[in-house]
Amino acid sequence: MLLTWPNHVSNTNIAGTVKTPKMTYEKIIRNIESNYTSLPTECKFELKINSKILTLDKETILVKEGQYADKTYFVASGCIRAYYLKDGKDVTDWFAFENDFINSINSYFQNIPSPHYIEVLEPCILLEIPRDTANRLSKDFIEFERLEKTVITKTMLQLQQRIVSMQFENAQQKYQNLLKARPDITERVQLTHIASFLGITLETLSRIRSIKN
Amino acid sequence: MLLTWPNHVSNTNIAGTVKTPKMTYEKIIRNIESNYTSLPTECKFELKINSKILTLDKETILVKEGQYADKTYFVASGCIRAYYLKDGKDVTDWFAFENDFINSINSYFQNIPSPHYIEVLEPCILLEIPRDTANRLSKDFIEFERLEKTVITKTMLQLQQRIVSMQFENAQQKYQNLLKARPDITERVQLTHIASFLGITLETLSRIRSIKN
DNA sequence: AATTAAATTTGATATATATCAAATGAAATA
DNA sequence: TATTTCATTTGATATATATCAAATTTAATT
């Protein structure tokens, strides 16, 4: 799953119509800096020559269950989800939108086979950062180590919030909360994925949406 | 809530009888190093002269709701919980045992009033590290920055696991999982706290414990 | 040891949401 | 445009766990 998901401006106009601005390393790295922390010039240079820009179609599978997923992706544009199969059922565990980082956390941090799949939901431009690169940059630049800490801290806080939400809110409230954080989500992501992310059934979500809201 | 909670050996003999070994800064810091990452001598020295050893009784409240909680505690011995009041009801959000770090994450990382209380459950020896100290050490020693990242990463992974568990396991399974990670928990922590931590009622927990197990 | 208070267990009932099943609507493909 | 496939909605029923209430057990205090 995961790395973070701030409440940021979307890159989308009307449902589905994603602008695909020409993305250079410079622009992407500038986005990282402005959303997280700034980096020294040499660190940025090293990042640039050791990472890759990916332009991907909808439905691309970036990571499969069982793989050693040793890359982190920064989403320059588009949207992605991490999911796993629980008794054969597809369960969304995390979404990443513009300016979020995402990886298969278990695999990436514990170097174990990934329980997650990572799938592209909208045409995406990503910056792919290999773990080796990230580790080296962390060793050489305290600012990069700090960037990682910042991203992880954000993620941790969100996970904690989500636990509170799951424990004490009913289906309706959970959905409202998600909408508050991500008002455009229903235009960008299928209801099945939203439902499983919220830990409710598709049917319940549908009913919630029809009454009132 | 939180910072981490590895599956370690307890410091307890028989329920309630906690040995209180003489704890020096050296010994505590050695424990931090052996459980997380090692630190340069100068960093350890700075940590020592800028932190405090606390010896606390059961029921001590370390942090109250509303406070700006800018300390992290390393548990040298004993056990602690973080909880909050949800509609007046006491909900345990995190436990910390020997060799765990704990702080009021929201307050500490976002510098906002703490939604949590932190309460001592067993006589404790703690190392209290002010945020200023932690921040300075992070700036001066990449190893300390890395220590923080390690602790936060562990916490994040545990939170993610807990979400999966909350979403797909029934009360029984949740309890079993907790027991697997922390077999001694029932001797050290009240069932009410365990129940609210698991997101089930005390009554349900009691029933689960009586049938079978 | 007796008394009070707190923690846990046990019981009866209510309820939100899951599950199963089918209908409708929207999008993709021929 | 017709046809197939996939996504969403709607309905009927089942179920795990919550809630409320009380009994019992354990621990703390006098």
Image (cartoon, coloured by chain):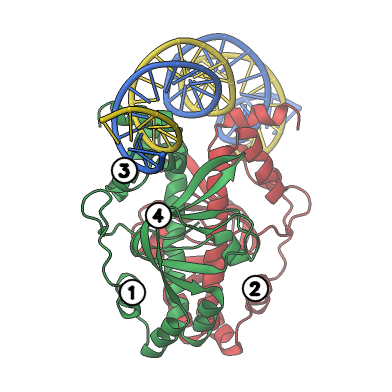
Chain colours: A green, B red, C blue, D yellow
Mark toward the start of the polypeptide (3 vs 1): 1
Up the image or down, B129 lies above or below B204; here it is below
Precedes in sequence: disc 4 or disc 3: 4
Image spot of residue A32 (x, y percent)? 35, 73
Q: Residues within 10 Å of mark 2 (few under 14, many from 20)?
A: many
Chain holding disc 2: B
Q: CA distance from mark 3 to mark 1?
A: 26 Å
Q: Which residue is mark 2?
A: B28
Foreground mark, 2 or 4, reads 4
The residue lying at 35 percent from left, 78 percent from top is A25
Quote the CA–CA distance across marks 2 and 4.
51 Å
Gap between marks 1 and 4 measured at Cα: 20 Å
Residue B73 in view of the camera: no
Is residue B6 found left or right of B72 in the rendered image? right
Q: Which residue is mark 4?
A: A58
Do dots 3 and 1 share one subunit? yes
Q: Residues within 10 Å of mark 4 (few under 14, many from 20)?
A: some
Give the residue type that dot 2 points to.
Ile
Q: Residues within 10 Å of mark 3 (few under 14, many from 20)?
A: some
Quarter residue B54 falls in = bottom right
Q: Which residue is mark 1?
A: A28
Residue type, numbered disc 4: Lys
Q: Are marks 4 and 3 in contact (CB under 8 Å)?
A: no
- In the rendered view, tell whether residue B70 sits above or below residue B30: above
Q: Earlier in the sequence, mark 1 or mark 4?
A: 1
Residue B57 position within the rendered picture, expressed as x and y whole percent measured from the top left: 59, 56
In the image, B52: left or right of A193?
right
The picture places residue A103, in percent across and down from the top left corner, at 50, 62
Q: Residue furthest right?
A: B13
Asked if the residues shown at circle 2 and circle 4 are in contact, with their CB atoms under 8 angstroms apart, the answer is no
Residue placed under numbered mark 3 in the picture: A186
Q: Chain of mark 3?
A: A
